[in-house]
Amino acid sequence: MSDDPMNQVSQVFEKSLQYVKRFSRYKNPDAVRQVREILSRYQLAEFELCVLGNLCPETVEEAIAMVPSIKTKGRAHDDDAIERMLNDLSLIKKFE
């Protein structure tokens, strides 16, 4: 490994890019925009949006386990709303 700081940054960037490509759920940039748009309709916090969009839970129980705050008191996310949100996400993944 080189002592050149620019080379080290490039290596870190390259490894990060490889990681993102390997674990990305969506290959199409339009699909990413659609996921973000759909999740934004549910007035989720940025953290909630990121977790649900990246981990793609398949059931309401998984979604609540990953992001318990979507079920907190005072929020309009009942099980049916969460189910609709997950169905919308699965349609995007299916047709990507």
Image (spheres, rainbow, N blue to C red):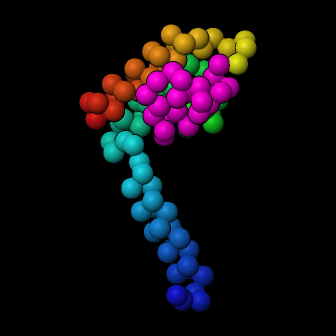
In the rendered image, the vertical position of residue 68 relative to residue 22, given as above or below? above
Q: Which residues are magenta?
A: 51-71
Q: Quadrant of the C terminus?
A: top left
Q: Is residue 70 left or right of residue 33?
A: right
Q: Main secondary structure of the magenta part?
A: helix
Q: Position of residue 94 (x, y in %)?
A: 29, 30
In the rendered image, the vertical position of residue 22 relative to residue 38, given as above or below? below
* Extreme-left residue of the structure: 95
Q: Is residue 59 left or right of residue 96?
A: right
User: Image quadrant of residue 71?
Assistant: top right
Q: Residue at x 70, y 19 (%)?
A: 72
Q: Position of residue 43 (x, y in %)?
A: 60, 21
Q: Residue at x 39, y 56 (%)?
A: 22
Q: Position of residue 81 (x, y in %)?
A: 52, 12
* Extreme-right residue of the structure: 73
In this orientation, does residue 71 appear? yes
In this orientation, does residue 41 appear? no
Tell me if residue 61 is in the magenta stretch: yes
User: Image quadrant of residue 51?
Assistant: top right
Q: Position of residue 45 (x, y in %)?
A: 64, 29
Q: Residue at x 60, y 14 (%)?
A: 77
Q: 28 or 52: nearer the eye?
A: 52
